Amino acid sequence: MRRFLFTILAVLLVLSGCQSAGNSGEKSNEKMDVKPPDRDLVEDGLPAFNEKIASLPKTDLEIWLAADYANEKPIQDAVKEFQSVYPNISVKTVGIEWGDMTNKVKLAVSSGAVPDMAHNHSFAFGAQGLAEPVDDLWKEWGEEDLFLPGGIEDVTWKGVKYGVPIDINTLIYLYNKKAFKKNGIKEAPKTFDELIEVSKKLTNKEKGQYGFVTNASGWSFFGQVVAQGTNILKFDGDKVTANLNDPVVVDTMKKYTDLALVHKASPVPPPQERQTDHPVAMFGTGRAASFISGPWDIARIKNEFPDAYKDLGTAVIPAKEKGSVLGGGSLFVPKGSKNKAASFELMKWFISDKYSIRLAKEMGRHPVKEHQYKDEFFNDPLLKPYVETLKYAQPYKLEAYPEANDAWGKALRSVFDGADVEKTLDNAQEVAEKSINYAK
């Protein structure tokens, strides 16, 4: 019995030690003599050596990145090089599914066991009181003017910055040039009505081939709304008004879902949370001739479907206006972390000239600083529509209101499942109005 109790006690001690070692943001009083490296970091495309970070005691950072970022080589190489310059800082990287990040951060903040960095849309977490403001660190850095306005938008809520953008994107039209030529279509459609007609022409029901692939992502569909000349939120200073059942929104959602439900020119999107895989698979295997997505899928098609990549063409979204949804992500410090300065410094490394271009080339994740688009990589004709659309893209601010955001996404899904468009958007509008009024 005594031996059994001893064994149990030993196991508990080991588990306790493991738990302690895994706590994020841990600091010790141990100081290290961290000296500047014998090279010019700025000449290497990296942030200048930061004496304040070098003077910190030993610090353990736990950072939560989107699962499709966390283990990618540019990210891991940036972490390794950062630690080589600042050996007093250790970094543990954890991959979290993008759609799970909000709930995990909320739980972490409420429990007090927060990571030191997280990845999503900083403005939304700032709006919900889940992120630390970092205006002081931005001011100290002094490089805001280098950023594209959209990148700053993604980290700002009511004039306060809550993070650093890591990449930026927008949506474009991707199509199979060979399929277009075979069906006598000389160029990409330029309006939504042309998109419908082209998609119908490219559909071959006998062969199980579709002209287009829709998806049930509220974020992605918002890009269609912007391209048709409206928005689902209206801003007047700090005053925000919901606009989910605007007549243009209703008409756009009906046309979009009718591609699948009425014209049968698209499959109905599968009922899964992650909506990005299905269109790529359909296009890459030749079962669909076009879809709307971002530049990250250019890289994905090149890597996963090289035969489809040979015939890939791109164009701006077929629509009334220029522009689409402004995407990308940003990094923030969850509320309660004690390592704001060290985390912010690491964020700067991820978007340095050295690693931003690698994120673009190797991952299809594009830069947030304007001068980085001068790299020859962006001379690729496939990226021209993306760079053009980026100038007019608008951020998806509905994420600042979780209940409204949820209602918008569910509305699109419900319409794909057969619900009436106008009634569904009227209901979503009511939820959005309550959500916005409650947030005030």
Image: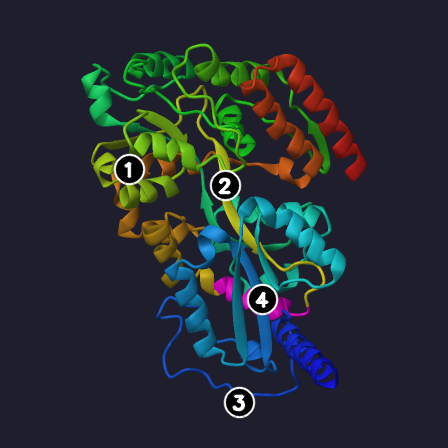
Residue pictured at 24% horizontal, 20% vertical: 180
Return the x and y of residue 82 as percentages of the image width and height.
46, 72
Query: Bounds of the magenta span?
Result: 338-348
Pointer 1 with pointer 4, Cβ within 8 A: no
- The crowding category of the residue bearing disc 4, from other C-alpha atoms within 10 Å (few below 14, some 14 to 19, many at least 20), is many
- What is the quadrant of the N terminus in the image? bottom right
Instruction: Determine whether the residue tagged by mark 1 lies in a helix, strand or loop.
Output: helix
Which numbered tag is attached to residue 382?
A: 1
- What is the quadrant of the C terminus in the image? top right
Q: Amino acid at mark 1?
A: Leu
Closer-to-camera residue (276/198): 276
Instruction: Determine whether the residue tagged by mark 2 lies in a helix, strand or loop.
Output: strand
- The crowding category of the residue bearing disc 1, from other C-alpha atoms within 10 Å (few below 14, some 14 to 19, many at least 20), is some
- How far apart, in angstroms, are the residues tagged by discs 3 and 1? 48 Å
Residue wearing tag 3: 33
Residue wearing tag 2: 327
Q: Amino acid at mark 2?
A: Gly
Q: Which of the two discs, 3 and 4, sits closer to the camera?
A: 4
Q: Amino acid at mark 3?
A: Asp
- The crowding category of the residue bearing disc 2, from other C-alpha atoms within 10 Å (few below 14, some 14 to 19, many at least 20), is many
* First of labels 3, 4 by sequence position: 3
Residue pictured at 51% horizontal, 85% vertical: 34
Pointer 3 with pointer 4, Cβ within 8 A: no
Question: Residue 54, located in which quarter of the rendered image?
Answer: bottom right
Magenta span dominant secondary structure:
helix
Residue wearing tag 4: 62
